[in-house]
Image: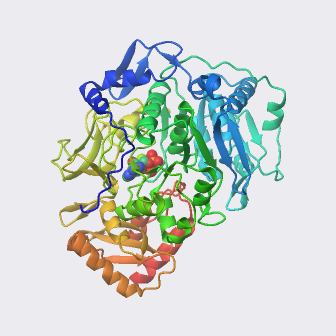
């Protein structure tokens, strides 16, 4: 590779990986001492495959570690700098959060919430959302946050599955200038659920709502309640939350996370990957409704006493400069976002970010999907001005925290655009073939995790059997994440897409990410998604969906030819798609991930299956009609 991307932050801890490699259990034992425990553990790890318990016998509380421990030193330090979609702003210091959380914990207790009870939270991105989560954690209730963009049917399933006796929502939430009527959605979702005892309603938009006898207003409940509530001393494996996965591959799964192990994983990865300093202003753009928001908006930054931005609305509202405006306004030093968001920003050109002062940035991150090398380079040059390392962090709802990432807080290594680089110390990640044998370098295979790790899910809520079959049945005693990958000569990992989506063409296997990145490297292309469909002669053929950058007027026939040439040169003739469809948008989950299985169904002329997590139905209808038109 001619270009070099070795950017260091001056850290070089040569011992960390050595320790982790020699004994992962004592390594994590040492990391757990960074947290505040009420009582120490007797055993670091109990491993009865596939169930792991970390720091057994220890007692801890997540809310205590996020708030109480900072009160002597940081009570006046901003914890959350909140920016409303309409430009409102509010600051919550560590002292403010401490009071609000204790009050709300007392509210929950006054409504009869006990240790182990589930509480569903369906709130927009407002400070009351982390407050409600931390209040649950404080008293040992299990929070289950549902992204506020979900419909009544989707939220109904999740409330029913978790049997929450309390639901917390708002009169409404702002999204692209419109009010989303969250309370109405909840009314509809819970109408048949007697087990839901109370609905707590936050007034955010002040639109008119109907209040039943179950409903209580947040502000009324908080008015006279005591602001002192001690944190419960909970066993390390006490469940902290249930969170449903994004549903990219099918029906979402109710992932259950514990406390002591999960927090240890977050504390460590936040320090190693983001190199967090007291003076940093951290901004993760994820909605708290997804795991990135749970781990790296709510828990990890607060464990470290960091200052962070929380933004309420859409990243392109009122226009696509909103993120850069926030970075400039708050002097953000660490920015963590998704490839989908970056592809959208890139689509509108460099002039927009170039008109903002982004000089406060020192570190950039990405998560959620494979990042195309072309997009990585744009992020590096146009946003980071070639002075910020980029961390490409691979992980899942199930892993709790990062599992693969470069770690500027630990070591300076050369970065490679499109590679997540190395496994997190203390994890055992390999790439294997169908039979579980490690494949040689540069050979594609399945990612697996061979040892338990502290952030690992406890199980799937109420379904140990499904937990065993989904994650632990493909390879004995190894966790199977369902992702396709490759390890190069330097041991760097390249995530190539979902294992289920792998293209099997004439005996070759091609990850969706490889082909999509090749297509996206064309100057006119903003985004692409590919999938395989059955073919009588070849077994499988590829179809590609392509979204062009804003303002591109190149003739489609010429473009199509150029793309074929490019694919033939970069990957080989076998990867040439049978059809290339130009579309205006791709079907995505509400968390912004491309839903290739829908494209596959459309390409096959099949019914499209579960669409409960689909963000915008019009993407599907457009594609259906374009595909039909071309097949005539
Ligand atoms: P479901 O499991 O319900 O289909 P999901 O897998 O999309 O949903 P998440 O847990 O939010 O739900 O996403 C994790 C997945 O996202 C990973 O398995 C991987 O496919 C992808 N992913 C996350 N980060 C990266 C990354 N840095 N590089 C490549 N892929 C990533
Ligand atoms: Mg998944």
Q: Is residue 446 left or right of residue 131?
A: left
Nearer-the-camera pick, 168 or 283: 283
Q: Quadrant of the N terminus?
A: bottom left
- Confirm whether residue 188 shows in the render: yes
Q: In this view, does 119 lie to the left or right of 476?
A: right
Is residue 610 positioned above or below 56 on the image?
below
Q: Where residue 158 sits: x, y (%)? A: 58, 42
What scheme was used to colour the molecule? rainbow
Nearer-the-camera pick, 320 or 60: 320
Q: Where residue 267 sits: x, y (%)? A: 47, 31
Q: In this view, does 433 lie to the left or right of 527?
A: left
Q: Where residue 355 sits: x, y (%)? A: 57, 67
Residue at 59%, 39% in the rendered image:
307
Is residue 152 positioned above or below 550 on the image?
above
Which residue lies most toward the left here?
440
Nearer-the-camera pick, 175 or 464: 175
Q: Quadrant of residue 272?
A: top left
Residue at 68%, 45% in the rendered image:
126
Count of marks, rendered view: 0
Q: Quadrant of the C terminus?
A: bottom left
Nearer-the-camera pick, 408 or 51: 408
Is residue 587 positioned above or below 496 on the image?
below
Q: Quadrant of residue 371?
A: bottom left
Residue at 40%, 33% in the rendered image:
465
Q: Quadrant of residue 30?
A: top left
- Confirm whether residue 537 shows in the render: no
Q: Where residue 255 sits: x, y (%)? A: 48, 37
């Amino acid at each position: 590779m001619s270009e070099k991307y070795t950017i260091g932050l001056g850290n070089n801890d040569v011992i960390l990986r050595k320790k982790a490699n020699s004994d992962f259990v004592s390594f994590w034992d040492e990391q757990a001492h960074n947290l505040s425990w009420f009582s120490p553990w007797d055993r670091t790890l109990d491993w009865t495959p596939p169930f792991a318990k970390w720091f057994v016998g220890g007692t801890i509380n997540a809310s205590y570690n996020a708030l109480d421990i900072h009160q002597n030193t940081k009570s006046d330090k901003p914890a959350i700098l909140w920016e409303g979609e309409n430009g409102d702003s509010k600051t919550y210091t560590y002292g403010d959060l401490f009071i609000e959380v204790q009050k709300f914990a007392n509210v929950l207790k006054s409504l009869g919430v006990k240790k182990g009870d589930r509480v569903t939270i369906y709130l927009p991105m407002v400070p009351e959302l982390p407050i409600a989560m931390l209040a649950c954690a404080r008293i040992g209730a299990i929070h289950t946050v549902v992204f506020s963009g979900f419909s009544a049917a989707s939220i109904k399933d999740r409330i029913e599955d978790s049997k929450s006796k309390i639901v917390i929502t708002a009169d409404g939430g702002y999204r692209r200038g419109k009010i989303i009527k969250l309370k109405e959605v909840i009314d509809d979702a819970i109408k048949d659920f007697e087990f839901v005892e109370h609905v707590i309603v936050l007034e955010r938009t002040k639109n008119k709502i109907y209040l039943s006898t179950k409903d209580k207003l947040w502000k009324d409940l908080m008015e006279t309640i005591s602001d002192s509530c001690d944190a419960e001393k909970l066993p390390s494996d006490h469940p902290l939350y249930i969170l449903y996965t994004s549903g990219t591959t099918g029906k979402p799964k109710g992932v259950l996370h514990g406390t002591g192990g999960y927090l240890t994983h977050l504390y460590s990865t936040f320090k190693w990957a983001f190199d967090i300093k007291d003076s940093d202003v951290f901004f993760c753009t994820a909605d708290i409704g997804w795991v990135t928001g749970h781990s790296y908006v709510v828990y990890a930054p607060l464990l470290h006493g960091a200052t962070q931005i929380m933004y309420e609305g859409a990243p392109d509202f009122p226009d696509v400069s909103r993120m850069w405006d926030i970075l400039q306004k708050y002097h953000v030093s660490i920015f963590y976002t998704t490839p989908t968001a970056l592809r959208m920003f890139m689509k509108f050109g460099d002039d927009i970010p170039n008109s903002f002062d982004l000089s406060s940035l020192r570190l950039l991150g990405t998560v959620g999907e494979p990042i195309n090398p072309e997009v990585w380079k744009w992020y590096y040059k146009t946003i980071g001005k070639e002075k910020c390392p980029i961390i490409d962090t691979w992980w899942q709802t199930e892993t709790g925290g990062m599992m693969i990432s470069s770690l500027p807080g630990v070591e300076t290594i050369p970065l490679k655009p499109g590679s997540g680089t190395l496994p997190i110390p203390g994890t055992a990640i390999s790439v294997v073939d169908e039979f579980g044998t490690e494949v040689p370098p540069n050979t594609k295979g399945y990612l697996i995790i061979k040892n338990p790790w502290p952030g690992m899910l406890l199980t799937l809520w109420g379904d140990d059997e499904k937990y065993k079959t989904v994650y632990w049945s493909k390879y004995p005693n190894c966790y199977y994440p369902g992702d396709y990958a490759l390890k190069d000569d330097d041991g760097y990992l390249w995530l190539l897409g979902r294992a289920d989506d792998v293209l099997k063409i004439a005996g070759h296997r091609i990850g969706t990410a490889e082909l999509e990145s090749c297509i996206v490297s064309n100057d006119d292309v903003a985004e692409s998604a590919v999938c395989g469909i059955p073919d009588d002669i070849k077994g499988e053929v590829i179809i590609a969906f392509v979204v062009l950058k804003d303002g591109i007027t190149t003739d489609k026939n010429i473009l199509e030819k150029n793309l074929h040439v490019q694919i033939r040169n970069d990957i080989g003739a076998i990867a040439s798609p049978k059809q290339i469809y130009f579309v205006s948008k791709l079907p995505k989950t509400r968390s912004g991930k491309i839903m290739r299985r829908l494209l596959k169904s459309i390409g096959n002329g099949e019914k499209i299956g579960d669409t409960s997590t689909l963000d915008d139905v019009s993407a599907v209808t457009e594609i259906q009609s374009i595909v039909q038109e071309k097949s005539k």
